[in-house]
Image (tube, coloured by chain):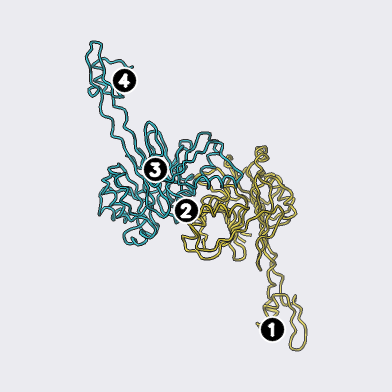
Chain colours: A yellow, B cyan
Amino acid sequence: MKLHILGCYAATPRTLTNPTSQVLEIRDHMFLIDCGEGTQVQLRINRIKFSRINHIFISHLHGDHFFGLPGLISTFRLLGRDKELHIYAPKGIKEAITLLLKLGDSWTNYPLVFHELTSKEPQVIYEDDKVTVETIPLNHRVFTNGFLFKEKLRERKLNINAVAQYKIDKCYFQSIKNGKDIILDDGKIIPNKVLTFDPAAPKGYAFCSDTGYFPDIIPQIQKVDTLYHESTFLESEAHLASKTKHATAKEAAKIAKKADVGLLILGHYSTRYRSLDLFKEEAMEIFNRVALAEDGKVFEF
Amino acid sequence: MKLHILGCYAATPRTLTNPTSQVLEIRDHMFLIDCGEGTQVQLRINRIKFSRINHIFISHLHGDHFFGLPGLISTFRLLGRDKELHIYAPKGIKEAITLLLKLGDSWTNYPLVFHELTSKEPQVIYEDDKVTVETIPLNHRVFTNGFLFKEKLRERKLNINAVAQYKIDKCYFQSIKNGKDIILDDGKIIPNKVLTFDPAAPKGYAFCSDTGYFPDIIPQIQKVDTLYHESTFLESEAHLASKTKHATAKEAAKIAKKADVGLLILGHYSTRYRSLDLFKEEAMEIFNRVALAEDGKVFEF
Protein backbone atom coordinates (compact mmCIF):
# COMPACT_ATOMS: atom_id res chain seq x y z
CA MET A 1 0.00 0.00 0.00
CA LYS A 2 1.16 3.48 -0.84
CA LEU A 3 -0.46 6.65 0.38
CA HIS A 4 0.10 9.88 -1.56
CA ILE A 5 -0.75 12.99 0.44
CA LEU A 6 -1.95 15.59 -2.08
CA GLY A 7 -3.18 18.02 0.55
CA CYS A 8 -3.43 17.84 4.33
CA TYR A 9 -4.33 21.30 5.59
CA ALA A 10 -7.56 22.71 6.98
CA ALA A 11 -9.75 25.04 4.95
CA THR A 12 -8.04 28.45 4.96
CA PRO A 13 -6.11 28.54 1.69
CA ARG A 14 -2.47 29.44 1.47
CA THR A 15 -0.07 29.76 -1.36
CA LEU A 16 1.84 26.60 -0.64
CA THR A 17 -0.56 24.27 1.15
CA ASN A 18 -3.56 22.37 -0.05
CA PRO A 19 -6.88 21.22 1.39
CA THR A 20 -7.59 17.54 1.96
CA SER A 21 -6.92 15.00 -0.74
CA GLN A 22 -5.08 11.70 -0.82
CA VAL A 23 -4.54 8.81 -3.18
CA LEU A 24 -4.31 5.29 -1.75
CA GLU A 25 -2.63 2.71 -3.94
CA ILE A 26 -3.92 -0.66 -2.83
CA ARG A 27 -3.86 -3.86 -4.89
CA ASP A 28 -3.97 -2.21 -8.33
CA HIS A 29 -6.46 0.42 -7.24
CA MET A 30 -5.81 4.14 -7.02
CA PHE A 31 -8.49 5.31 -4.61
CA LEU A 32 -8.92 9.06 -4.39
CA ILE A 33 -9.94 10.15 -0.89
CA ASP A 34 -11.47 13.61 -0.62
CA CYS A 35 -11.01 16.19 -3.33
CA GLY A 36 -10.41 19.73 -2.07
CA GLU A 37 -10.07 22.61 -4.52
CA GLY A 38 -6.98 22.21 -6.66
CA THR A 39 -6.83 18.42 -6.40
CA GLN A 40 -6.53 17.97 -10.16
CA VAL A 41 -3.40 20.12 -10.18
CA GLN A 42 -2.00 18.18 -7.21
CA LEU A 43 -2.62 14.94 -9.10
CA ARG A 44 -0.51 16.34 -11.94
CA ILE A 45 2.22 17.55 -9.61
CA ASN A 46 2.32 14.15 -7.92
CA ARG A 47 2.38 12.44 -11.33
CA ILE A 48 -0.72 10.35 -10.73
CA LYS A 49 -2.42 9.33 -13.94
CA PHE A 50 -6.00 10.54 -14.11
CA SER A 51 -6.97 7.41 -15.99
CA ARG A 52 -6.09 5.21 -13.02
CA ILE A 53 -8.68 6.83 -10.79
CA ASN A 54 -11.99 5.01 -10.90
CA HIS A 55 -13.26 5.43 -7.34
CA ILE A 56 -13.51 8.64 -5.35
CA PHE A 57 -14.45 8.65 -1.67
CA ILE A 58 -15.68 11.92 -0.15
CA SER A 59 -15.84 12.14 3.64
CA HIS A 60 -18.24 15.05 3.93
CA LEU A 61 -19.61 18.03 2.04
CA HIS A 62 -17.52 20.86 3.43
CA GLY A 63 -15.85 22.73 0.61
CA ASP A 64 -12.27 21.94 1.58
CA HIS A 65 -13.06 18.25 1.06
CA PHE A 66 -14.92 18.32 -2.27
CA PHE A 67 -14.76 21.65 -4.14
CA GLY A 68 -12.16 20.11 -6.44
CA LEU A 69 -14.56 17.39 -7.56
CA PRO A 70 -16.62 19.31 -10.17
CA GLY A 71 -13.46 20.39 -11.96
CA LEU A 72 -11.98 16.90 -11.89
CA ILE A 73 -15.19 15.43 -13.31
CA SER A 74 -15.12 18.02 -16.12
CA THR A 75 -11.47 17.36 -16.82
CA PHE A 76 -12.07 13.63 -17.12
CA ARG A 77 -14.43 14.45 -19.98
CA LEU A 78 -11.92 16.76 -21.66
CA LEU A 79 -9.37 13.97 -21.48
CA GLY A 80 -11.74 11.64 -23.30
CA ARG A 81 -12.49 9.27 -20.44
CA ASP A 82 -14.94 6.50 -21.23
CA LYS A 83 -14.59 4.28 -18.15
CA GLU A 84 -17.07 4.41 -15.29
CA LEU A 85 -16.27 6.77 -12.44
CA HIS A 86 -17.69 5.86 -9.03
CA ILE A 87 -18.26 8.50 -6.40
CA TYR A 88 -18.99 7.58 -2.78
CA ALA A 89 -20.18 10.61 -0.85
CA PRO A 90 -22.91 11.89 1.44
CA LYS A 91 -26.35 12.31 -0.03
CA GLY A 92 -26.56 15.56 -1.95
CA ILE A 93 -23.44 15.08 -4.03
CA LYS A 94 -25.43 13.90 -7.04
CA GLU A 95 -27.72 16.94 -6.94
CA ALA A 96 -24.71 19.27 -6.67
CA ILE A 97 -22.69 17.76 -9.50
CA THR A 98 -25.74 17.37 -11.72
CA LEU A 99 -26.67 21.01 -11.21
CA LEU A 100 -23.15 22.25 -11.96
CA LEU A 101 -23.01 20.20 -15.14
CA LYS A 102 -26.48 21.36 -16.18
CA LEU A 103 -25.64 25.04 -15.65
CA GLY A 104 -22.73 24.68 -18.06
CA ASP A 105 -24.95 22.77 -20.50
CA SER A 106 -22.33 20.10 -19.96
CA TRP A 107 -22.23 16.38 -19.47
CA THR A 108 -19.85 13.47 -19.01
CA ASN A 109 -19.11 11.17 -21.88
CA TYR A 110 -18.44 8.39 -19.38
CA PRO A 111 -20.79 6.77 -16.86
CA LEU A 112 -20.74 8.74 -13.62
CA VAL A 113 -22.05 6.50 -10.85
CA PHE A 114 -23.03 8.05 -7.55
CA HIS A 115 -23.14 5.99 -4.36
CA GLU A 116 -24.83 8.32 -1.91
CA LEU A 117 -24.21 7.59 1.75
CA THR A 118 -26.78 8.10 4.47
CA SER A 119 -26.16 5.39 7.07
CA LYS A 120 -24.91 6.29 10.51
CA GLU A 121 -23.63 2.73 10.95
CA PRO A 122 -20.46 1.39 9.37
CA GLN A 123 -21.19 -0.24 6.02
CA VAL A 124 -19.19 -1.93 3.29
CA ILE A 125 -19.46 0.39 0.30
CA TYR A 126 -16.98 -1.29 -2.02
CA GLU A 127 -15.81 -4.87 -2.34
CA ASP A 128 -13.98 -6.94 -4.91
CA ASP A 129 -11.80 -10.04 -4.69
CA LYS A 130 -8.88 -8.06 -3.30
CA VAL A 131 -10.13 -5.24 -1.09
CA THR A 132 -13.04 -3.92 0.90
CA VAL A 133 -13.89 -0.36 1.82
CA GLU A 134 -16.08 0.40 4.84
CA THR A 135 -17.41 3.69 6.12
CA ILE A 136 -16.30 4.82 9.58
CA PRO A 137 -19.03 7.13 10.90
CA LEU A 138 -17.36 10.17 12.47
CA ASN A 139 -18.44 13.00 14.71
CA HIS A 140 -18.31 16.30 12.83
CA ARG A 141 -20.65 19.24 12.29
CA VAL A 142 -22.20 17.60 9.23
CA PHE A 143 -22.72 13.95 8.26
CA THR A 144 -19.17 12.64 7.87
CA ASN A 145 -17.56 9.27 7.22
CA GLY A 146 -14.03 8.11 7.48
CA PHE A 147 -13.08 5.13 5.34
CA LEU A 148 -11.44 1.83 6.25
CA PHE A 149 -9.58 0.23 3.37
CA LYS A 150 -8.74 -3.44 3.94
CA GLU A 151 -6.91 -5.92 1.81
CA LYS A 152 -8.39 -9.38 1.67
CA LEU A 153 -6.19 -12.34 2.55
CA ARG A 154 -4.05 -13.04 -0.51
CA GLU A 155 -3.67 -16.54 -1.96
CA ARG A 156 -1.03 -18.78 -0.35
CA LYS A 157 2.53 -18.51 -1.65
CA LEU A 158 3.85 -21.45 -3.63
CA ASN A 159 6.87 -23.24 -2.14
CA ILE A 160 8.83 -23.65 -5.38
CA ASN A 161 11.23 -26.17 -3.90
CA ALA A 162 8.46 -28.37 -2.54
CA VAL A 163 6.46 -28.51 -5.77
CA ALA A 164 9.67 -29.30 -7.67
CA GLN A 165 10.55 -32.08 -5.23
CA TYR A 166 7.16 -33.73 -5.75
CA LYS A 167 7.27 -33.05 -9.52
CA ILE A 168 3.84 -31.41 -9.39
CA ASP A 169 2.60 -30.12 -12.72
CA LYS A 170 2.05 -26.39 -13.23
CA CYS A 171 -1.62 -26.91 -13.94
CA TYR A 172 -2.15 -27.62 -10.21
CA PHE A 173 -0.38 -24.45 -8.99
CA GLN A 174 -3.47 -22.26 -8.82
CA SER A 175 -5.45 -24.80 -6.78
CA ILE A 176 -2.46 -25.21 -4.45
CA LYS A 177 -2.33 -21.43 -3.98
CA ASN A 178 -6.04 -21.59 -3.22
CA GLY A 179 -5.28 -23.98 -0.34
CA LYS A 180 -5.92 -27.44 -1.84
CA ASP A 181 -3.93 -30.55 -0.87
CA ILE A 182 -2.44 -32.65 -3.71
CA ILE A 183 -2.81 -36.37 -4.36
CA LEU A 184 0.22 -37.76 -6.17
CA ASP A 185 -0.05 -40.51 -8.83
CA ASP A 186 0.91 -43.10 -6.18
CA GLY A 187 -2.03 -41.97 -4.02
CA LYS A 188 0.10 -40.18 -1.49
CA ILE A 189 -1.49 -37.00 -0.13
CA ILE A 190 0.73 -33.94 0.17
CA PRO A 191 -0.89 -31.47 2.58
CA ASN A 192 -1.14 -27.90 1.34
CA LYS A 193 0.97 -26.53 4.17
CA VAL A 194 3.96 -28.51 2.84
CA LEU A 195 3.57 -26.91 -0.59
CA THR A 196 2.91 -23.33 0.42
CA PHE A 197 3.84 -20.52 2.74
CA ASP A 198 1.42 -18.24 4.55
CA PRO A 199 0.60 -15.12 2.54
CA ALA A 200 1.51 -11.74 3.89
CA ALA A 201 -0.96 -10.52 6.49
CA PRO A 202 -3.58 -8.32 4.84
CA LYS A 203 -3.12 -4.66 5.53
CA GLY A 204 -5.50 -1.91 6.41
CA TYR A 205 -5.65 1.86 6.25
CA ALA A 206 -8.13 4.02 8.13
CA PHE A 207 -8.80 7.59 7.04
CA CYS A 208 -10.54 9.64 9.74
CA SER A 209 -11.17 13.27 8.87
CA ASP A 210 -12.91 15.50 9.90
CA THR A 211 -13.94 14.51 13.40
CA GLY A 212 -13.97 15.52 17.00
CA TYR A 213 -12.55 13.10 19.57
CA PHE A 214 -14.75 10.06 19.01
CA PRO A 215 -13.78 6.81 20.78
CA ASP A 216 -16.72 4.98 19.16
CA ILE A 217 -14.47 4.32 16.16
CA ILE A 218 -11.89 2.38 18.19
CA PRO A 219 -13.34 -1.13 17.82
CA GLN A 220 -13.64 -0.71 14.06
CA ILE A 221 -10.08 0.49 13.52
CA GLN A 222 -8.49 -1.81 16.15
CA LYS A 223 -4.91 -2.73 15.19
CA VAL A 224 -5.15 -1.22 11.73
CA ASP A 225 -1.72 -0.79 10.16
CA THR A 226 -2.05 2.91 9.49
CA LEU A 227 -4.47 5.48 10.82
CA TYR A 228 -4.73 8.97 9.35
CA HIS A 229 -6.49 10.99 12.02
CA GLU A 230 -7.16 14.67 11.76
CA SER A 231 -5.50 16.98 14.26
CA THR A 232 -6.69 20.43 13.31
CA PHE A 233 -5.59 21.90 16.62
CA LEU A 234 -3.21 21.54 19.53
CA GLU A 235 -4.47 21.13 23.10
CA SER A 236 -3.94 24.86 23.62
CA GLU A 237 -6.95 25.34 21.30
CA ALA A 238 -8.97 22.43 22.71
CA HIS A 239 -11.90 24.79 23.19
CA LEU A 240 -11.92 25.50 19.42
CA ALA A 241 -11.58 21.81 18.64
CA SER A 242 -14.56 21.04 20.81
CA LYS A 243 -16.62 23.88 19.39
CA THR A 244 -15.91 23.04 15.74
CA LYS A 245 -15.88 19.25 16.19
CA HIS A 246 -12.28 18.82 15.27
CA ALA A 247 -9.59 16.92 17.16
CA THR A 248 -6.35 17.94 18.80
CA ALA A 249 -3.09 16.10 18.21
CA LYS A 250 -3.37 14.68 21.71
CA GLU A 251 -6.86 13.37 21.04
CA ALA A 252 -5.74 11.78 17.79
CA ALA A 253 -2.95 10.06 19.72
CA LYS A 254 -5.38 8.80 22.35
CA ILE A 255 -7.47 7.16 19.63
CA ALA A 256 -4.34 5.67 18.07
CA LYS A 257 -3.18 4.31 21.41
CA LYS A 258 -6.51 2.78 22.38
CA ALA A 259 -6.86 1.21 18.93
CA ASP A 260 -3.22 0.06 19.04
CA VAL A 261 -2.60 1.04 15.44
CA GLY A 262 0.70 0.47 13.66
CA LEU A 263 1.27 4.09 12.71
CA LEU A 264 -0.61 7.31 13.32
CA ILE A 265 -0.42 9.93 10.58
CA LEU A 266 -1.53 13.39 11.63
CA GLY A 267 -3.06 15.94 9.24
CA HIS A 268 -5.74 18.55 8.53
CA TYR A 269 -3.66 21.14 10.31
CA SER A 270 -4.94 24.59 11.08
CA THR A 271 -2.56 27.08 9.49
CA ARG A 272 -2.25 29.10 12.70
CA TYR A 273 0.75 27.19 14.05
CA ARG A 274 4.36 28.04 13.32
CA SER A 275 5.56 24.45 12.94
CA LEU A 276 4.07 21.03 12.28
CA ASP A 277 6.56 19.58 14.77
CA LEU A 278 4.33 20.88 17.54
CA PHE A 279 1.63 18.42 16.47
CA LYS A 280 4.04 15.52 16.51
CA GLU A 281 5.50 16.46 19.88
CA GLU A 282 2.07 16.71 21.44
CA ALA A 283 0.91 13.38 20.00
CA MET A 284 4.10 11.57 21.04
CA GLU A 285 3.43 12.32 24.68
CA ILE A 286 0.63 9.77 24.35
CA PHE A 287 1.68 7.44 21.53
CA ASN A 288 5.07 6.89 20.00
CA ARG A 289 4.43 5.80 16.42
CA VAL A 290 3.50 9.14 14.91
CA ALA A 291 4.19 10.62 11.49
CA LEU A 292 3.24 13.97 10.00
CA ALA A 293 1.36 14.21 6.74
CA GLU A 294 2.78 16.82 4.40
CA ASP A 295 1.62 17.78 0.94
CA GLY A 296 3.49 15.66 -1.59
CA LYS A 297 4.69 13.09 0.96
CA VAL A 298 4.32 9.38 0.17
CA PHE A 299 3.91 6.70 2.85
CA GLU A 300 4.50 3.04 2.08
CA PHE A 301 3.17 0.33 4.34
CA MET B 1 -6.18 51.01 -14.54
CA LYS B 2 -4.24 47.92 -13.73
CA LEU B 3 -5.09 44.44 -14.92
CA HIS B 4 -3.75 41.44 -13.00
CA ILE B 5 -3.90 38.21 -14.98
CA LEU B 6 -4.42 35.41 -12.45
CA GLY B 7 -5.09 32.76 -15.05
CA CYS B 8 -5.48 32.85 -18.81
CA TYR B 9 -5.59 29.29 -20.07
CA ALA B 10 -8.43 27.15 -21.37
CA ALA B 11 -9.96 24.39 -19.31
CA THR B 12 -7.50 21.49 -19.37
CA PRO B 13 -5.53 21.84 -16.14
CA ARG B 14 -1.78 21.81 -16.02
CA THR B 15 0.70 22.08 -13.25
CA LEU B 16 1.81 25.60 -13.98
CA THR B 17 -1.10 27.29 -15.71
CA ASN B 18 -4.46 28.44 -14.45
CA PRO B 19 -7.97 28.78 -15.81
CA THR B 20 -9.54 32.19 -16.36
CA SER B 21 -9.41 34.82 -13.66
CA GLN B 22 -8.38 38.49 -13.62
CA VAL B 23 -8.48 41.42 -11.28
CA LEU B 24 -9.10 44.88 -12.71
CA GLU B 25 -8.02 47.81 -10.55
CA ILE B 26 -10.09 50.79 -11.62
CA ARG B 27 -10.70 53.94 -9.55
CA ASP B 28 -10.34 52.30 -6.12
CA HIS B 29 -12.20 49.16 -7.16
CA MET B 30 -10.73 45.69 -7.39
CA PHE B 31 -13.11 43.91 -9.75
CA LEU B 32 -12.66 40.15 -9.97
CA ILE B 33 -13.48 38.85 -13.44
CA ASP B 34 -14.17 35.11 -13.67
CA CYS B 35 -13.05 32.74 -11.00
CA GLY B 36 -11.68 29.43 -12.26
CA GLU B 37 -10.62 26.71 -9.83
CA GLY B 38 -7.65 27.83 -7.76
CA THR B 39 -8.39 31.56 -8.02
CA GLN B 40 -8.12 32.07 -4.28
CA VAL B 41 -4.59 30.71 -4.33
CA GLN B 42 -3.75 32.91 -7.33
CA LEU B 43 -5.05 35.93 -5.41
CA ARG B 44 -2.61 35.06 -2.63
CA ILE B 45 0.27 34.52 -5.03
CA ASN B 46 -0.46 37.85 -6.71
CA ARG B 47 -0.73 39.53 -3.29
CA ILE B 48 -4.23 40.85 -3.81
CA LYS B 49 -6.04 41.45 -0.57
CA PHE B 50 -9.25 39.45 -0.30
CA SER B 51 -10.87 42.28 1.61
CA ARG B 52 -10.60 44.61 -1.38
CA ILE B 53 -12.81 42.42 -3.55
CA ASN B 54 -16.45 43.42 -3.37
CA HIS B 55 -17.66 42.69 -6.90
CA ILE B 56 -17.21 39.50 -8.88
CA PHE B 57 -18.19 39.25 -12.56
CA ILE B 58 -18.66 35.78 -14.04
CA SER B 59 -18.85 35.53 -17.82
CA HIS B 60 -20.52 32.12 -18.05
CA LEU B 61 -21.11 28.93 -16.15
CA HIS B 62 -18.45 26.67 -17.60
CA GLY B 63 -16.33 25.25 -14.82
CA ASP B 64 -13.05 26.83 -15.87
CA HIS B 65 -14.67 30.25 -15.32
CA PHE B 66 -16.40 29.75 -11.97
CA PHE B 67 -15.41 26.56 -10.10
CA GLY B 68 -13.18 28.67 -7.86
CA LEU B 69 -16.12 30.75 -6.67
CA PRO B 70 -17.62 28.44 -4.02
CA GLY B 71 -14.26 28.12 -2.31
CA LEU B 72 -13.63 31.85 -2.40
CA ILE B 73 -17.06 32.54 -0.90
CA SER B 74 -16.32 30.04 1.90
CA THR B 75 -12.91 31.54 2.51
CA PHE B 76 -14.36 35.04 2.84
CA ARG B 77 -16.38 33.69 5.76
CA LEU B 78 -13.38 32.04 7.38
CA LEU B 79 -11.55 35.34 7.13
CA GLY B 80 -14.36 37.06 9.03
CA ARG B 81 -15.69 39.18 6.18
CA ASP B 82 -18.72 41.31 7.04
CA LYS B 83 -18.96 43.54 3.94
CA GLU B 84 -21.41 42.83 1.14
CA LEU B 85 -20.16 40.70 -1.74
CA HIS B 86 -21.83 41.25 -5.12
CA ILE B 87 -21.83 38.54 -7.73
CA TYR B 88 -22.84 39.26 -11.32
CA ALA B 89 -23.32 36.03 -13.23
CA PRO B 90 -25.72 34.14 -15.46
CA LYS B 91 -28.93 32.92 -13.91
CA GLY B 92 -28.34 29.71 -12.00
CA ILE B 93 -25.37 30.91 -9.98
CA LYS B 94 -27.52 31.59 -6.92
CA GLU B 95 -29.03 28.12 -6.97
CA ALA B 96 -25.57 26.55 -7.32
CA ILE B 97 -23.88 28.51 -4.55
CA THR B 98 -26.88 28.17 -2.26
CA LEU B 99 -26.96 24.42 -2.74
CA LEU B 100 -23.23 24.02 -2.09
CA LEU B 101 -23.49 26.07 1.11
CA LYS B 102 -26.58 24.15 2.22
CA LEU B 103 -24.93 20.77 1.66
CA GLY B 104 -22.12 21.78 4.01
CA ASP B 105 -24.67 23.13 6.51
CA SER B 106 -22.74 26.33 5.92
CA TRP B 107 -23.53 29.98 5.43
CA THR B 108 -21.91 33.36 4.91
CA ASN B 109 -21.66 35.82 7.78
CA TYR B 110 -21.72 38.66 5.25
CA PRO B 111 -24.43 39.68 2.79
CA LEU B 112 -24.03 37.76 -0.45
CA VAL B 113 -25.87 39.62 -3.18
CA PHE B 114 -26.54 37.86 -6.48
CA HIS B 115 -27.20 39.84 -9.65
CA GLU B 116 -28.35 37.16 -12.05
CA LEU B 117 -28.00 38.00 -15.72
CA THR B 118 -30.43 36.89 -18.39
CA SER B 119 -30.53 39.66 -21.00
CA LYS B 120 -29.18 39.06 -24.47
CA GLU B 121 -28.78 42.82 -24.95
CA PRO B 122 -25.96 44.90 -23.43
CA GLN B 123 -26.97 46.32 -20.08
CA VAL B 124 -25.36 48.43 -17.38
CA ILE B 125 -25.02 46.13 -14.39
CA TYR B 126 -22.93 48.35 -12.13
CA GLU B 127 -22.63 52.11 -11.84
CA ASP B 128 -21.27 54.56 -9.29
CA ASP B 129 -19.85 58.07 -9.57
CA LYS B 130 -16.58 56.81 -11.01
CA VAL B 131 -17.21 53.78 -13.21
CA THR B 132 -19.79 51.81 -15.14
CA VAL B 133 -19.82 48.15 -16.04
CA GLU B 134 -21.83 46.86 -18.99
CA THR B 135 -22.39 43.37 -20.25
CA ILE B 136 -21.14 42.51 -23.74
CA PRO B 137 -23.29 39.63 -25.01
CA LEU B 138 -20.99 37.05 -26.61
CA ASN B 139 -21.44 34.04 -28.83
CA HIS B 140 -20.49 30.87 -26.95
CA ARG B 141 -22.07 27.46 -26.36
CA VAL B 142 -23.89 28.72 -23.27
CA PHE B 143 -25.24 32.15 -22.28
CA THR B 144 -22.09 34.26 -21.98
CA ASN B 145 -21.29 37.89 -21.36
CA GLY B 146 -18.12 39.84 -21.68
CA PHE B 147 -17.84 42.97 -19.58
CA LEU B 148 -17.03 46.56 -20.54
CA PHE B 149 -15.52 48.57 -17.69
CA LYS B 150 -15.56 52.32 -18.29
CA GLU B 151 -14.30 55.17 -16.20
CA LYS B 152 -16.51 58.22 -16.01
CA LEU B 153 -15.02 61.56 -16.94
CA ARG B 154 -12.98 62.78 -13.97
CA GLU B 155 -13.28 66.27 -12.55
CA ARG B 156 -11.21 68.99 -14.27
CA LYS B 157 -7.63 69.50 -13.11
CA LEU B 158 -6.87 72.69 -11.21
CA ASN B 159 -4.36 75.04 -12.83
CA ILE B 160 -2.40 75.91 -9.68
CA ASN B 161 -0.64 78.87 -11.24
CA ALA B 162 -3.87 80.44 -12.50
CA VAL B 163 -5.73 80.16 -9.19
CA ALA B 164 -2.69 81.66 -7.43
CA GLN B 165 -2.53 84.51 -9.92
CA TYR B 166 -6.17 85.43 -9.27
CA LYS B 167 -5.77 84.81 -5.52
CA ILE B 168 -8.76 82.49 -5.49
CA ASP B 169 -9.59 81.01 -2.10
CA LYS B 170 -9.29 77.26 -1.55
CA CYS B 171 -12.96 76.99 -0.72
CA TYR B 172 -13.76 77.47 -4.45
CA PHE B 173 -11.42 74.79 -5.68
CA GLN B 174 -13.99 71.98 -5.73
CA SER B 175 -16.53 74.01 -7.70
CA ILE B 176 -13.78 75.00 -10.16
CA LYS B 177 -12.89 71.34 -10.59
CA ASN B 178 -16.58 70.71 -11.20
CA GLY B 179 -16.44 73.18 -14.12
CA LYS B 180 -17.75 76.42 -12.63
CA ASP B 181 -16.49 79.89 -13.67
CA ILE B 182 -15.37 82.28 -10.91
CA ILE B 183 -16.50 85.87 -10.29
CA LEU B 184 -13.78 87.89 -8.60
CA ASP B 185 -14.51 90.57 -5.94
CA ASP B 186 -14.22 93.24 -8.63
CA GLY B 187 -16.94 91.53 -10.66
CA LYS B 188 -14.58 90.16 -13.30
CA ILE B 189 -15.51 86.69 -14.55
CA ILE B 190 -12.70 84.15 -14.94
CA PRO B 191 -13.84 81.37 -17.27
CA ASN B 192 -13.29 77.86 -16.00
CA LYS B 193 -11.04 76.92 -18.90
CA VAL B 194 -8.50 79.50 -17.67
CA LEU B 195 -8.42 77.90 -14.22
CA THR B 196 -8.35 74.26 -15.21
CA PHE B 197 -6.92 71.70 -17.54
CA ASP B 198 -8.91 68.97 -19.25
CA PRO B 199 -8.99 65.78 -17.17
CA ALA B 200 -7.41 62.66 -18.53
CA ALA B 201 -9.64 60.94 -21.05
CA PRO B 202 -11.68 58.24 -19.31
CA LYS B 203 -10.40 54.79 -20.01
CA GLY B 204 -12.12 51.57 -20.83
CA TYR B 205 -11.39 47.87 -20.66
CA ALA B 206 -13.35 45.18 -22.49
CA PHE B 207 -13.16 41.56 -21.39
CA CYS B 208 -14.42 39.16 -24.05
CA SER B 209 -14.18 35.48 -23.17
CA ASP B 210 -15.39 32.92 -24.16
CA THR B 211 -16.67 33.62 -27.64
CA GLY B 212 -16.55 32.61 -31.23
CA TYR B 213 -15.79 35.27 -33.84
CA PHE B 214 -18.63 37.73 -33.23
CA PRO B 215 -18.48 41.11 -35.01
CA ASP B 216 -21.73 42.19 -33.31
CA ILE B 217 -19.62 43.38 -30.37
CA ILE B 218 -17.61 45.86 -32.44
CA PRO B 219 -19.82 48.97 -32.04
CA GLN B 220 -19.92 48.48 -28.28
CA ILE B 221 -16.16 48.15 -27.83
CA GLN B 222 -15.21 50.74 -30.49
CA LYS B 223 -11.92 52.48 -29.61
CA VAL B 224 -11.74 50.94 -26.16
CA ASP B 225 -8.25 51.35 -24.67
CA THR B 226 -7.72 47.67 -23.99
CA LEU B 227 -9.51 44.62 -25.27
CA TYR B 228 -8.92 41.16 -23.80
CA HIS B 229 -10.21 38.78 -26.43
CA GLU B 230 -10.01 35.05 -26.16
CA SER B 231 -7.90 33.16 -28.69
CA THR B 232 -8.27 29.55 -27.71
CA PHE B 233 -6.92 28.35 -31.04
CA LEU B 234 -4.76 29.24 -34.00
CA GLU B 235 -6.16 29.31 -37.54
CA SER B 236 -4.79 25.80 -38.08
CA GLU B 237 -7.55 24.67 -35.68
CA ALA B 238 -10.22 27.02 -37.05
CA HIS B 239 -12.54 24.03 -37.44
CA LEU B 240 -12.31 23.36 -33.69
CA ALA B 241 -12.82 27.04 -32.91
CA SER B 242 -15.94 27.09 -35.02
CA LYS B 243 -17.26 23.84 -33.54
CA THR B 244 -16.68 24.85 -29.92
CA LYS B 245 -17.55 28.55 -30.38
CA HIS B 246 -14.11 29.80 -29.54
CA ALA B 247 -11.98 32.27 -31.50
CA THR B 248 -8.63 32.00 -33.20
CA ALA B 249 -5.86 34.57 -32.69
CA LYS B 250 -6.54 35.87 -36.19
CA GLU B 251 -10.23 36.34 -35.45
CA ALA B 252 -9.43 38.17 -32.20
CA ALA B 253 -7.16 40.48 -34.21
CA LYS B 254 -9.88 41.12 -36.78
CA ILE B 255 -12.23 42.23 -34.02
CA ALA B 256 -9.49 44.43 -32.51
CA LYS B 257 -8.76 46.02 -35.88
CA LYS B 258 -12.38 46.71 -36.76
CA ALA B 259 -12.99 48.16 -33.29
CA ASP B 260 -9.73 50.14 -33.52
CA VAL B 261 -8.81 49.33 -29.92
CA GLY B 262 -5.69 50.66 -28.22
CA LEU B 263 -4.29 47.28 -27.29
CA LEU B 264 -5.38 43.71 -27.86
CA ILE B 265 -4.52 41.21 -25.13
CA LEU B 266 -4.83 37.59 -26.15
CA GLY B 267 -5.68 34.77 -23.73
CA HIS B 268 -7.67 31.60 -22.97
CA TYR B 269 -5.09 29.57 -24.80
CA SER B 270 -5.53 25.91 -25.53
CA THR B 271 -2.61 24.06 -24.01
CA ARG B 272 -1.92 22.14 -27.22
CA TYR B 273 0.54 24.68 -28.64
CA ARG B 274 4.27 24.70 -28.01
CA SER B 275 4.59 28.46 -27.64
CA LEU B 276 2.37 31.46 -26.94
CA ASP B 277 4.38 33.44 -29.47
CA LEU B 278 2.47 31.63 -32.20
CA PHE B 279 -0.70 33.41 -31.06
CA LYS B 280 0.96 36.80 -31.15
CA GLU B 281 2.53 36.19 -34.56
CA GLU B 282 -0.80 35.15 -36.05
CA ALA B 283 -2.65 38.14 -34.58
CA MET B 284 -0.01 40.62 -35.68
CA GLU B 285 -0.55 39.70 -39.30
CA ILE B 286 -3.86 41.55 -38.93
CA PHE B 287 -3.32 44.09 -36.13
CA ASN B 288 -0.10 45.40 -34.66
CA ARG B 289 -0.90 46.34 -31.05
CA VAL B 290 -0.99 42.88 -29.54
CA ALA B 291 0.11 41.63 -26.14
CA LEU B 292 -0.01 38.14 -24.65
CA ALA B 293 -1.73 37.50 -21.34
CA GLU B 294 0.34 35.31 -19.05
CA ASP B 295 -0.50 34.11 -15.55
CA GLY B 296 0.90 36.61 -13.06
CA LYS B 297 1.40 39.38 -15.64
CA VAL B 298 0.19 42.91 -14.84
CA PHE B 299 -0.89 45.40 -17.50
CA GLU B 300 -1.16 49.10 -16.74
CA PHE B 301 -3.12 51.45 -18.97
Q: CA distance from mark 3 to mark 1?
A: 73 Å
Q: CA distance from mark 2 to mark 3?
A: 26 Å
Q: Which numbered disc, 3 or 4, marks the residue that appears first in the sequence?
A: 3
Disc on res. A168: 1
Amino acid on which disc 1 is placed: Ile
Task: Tell us which disc is closer to us: 2 or 3.
Answer: 2
- Looking at the rendered structure, whether the residues under marks 3 and 4 are on a common chain is answered as yes
SS at badge 1:
loop
Q: Label 2 crowding class (10 Å Cα cut-off): few <14, some 14-19, many 20+?
A: some
The correct choice, above or below, for B155 with respect to A125 in the image is: above
Q: What is the secondary structure assignment of the residue under circle 2?
A: loop
Name the residue that disc number 3 marks: B4
Q: Secondary structure at mark 3?
A: strand
Q: CA distance from mark 2 to mark 1?
A: 63 Å
* Farthest residue, direction top: B186
What amino acid does circle 3 point to? His
Residue type beneath disc 4: Phe
Disc 2 to disc 3: CB gap under 8 Å = no
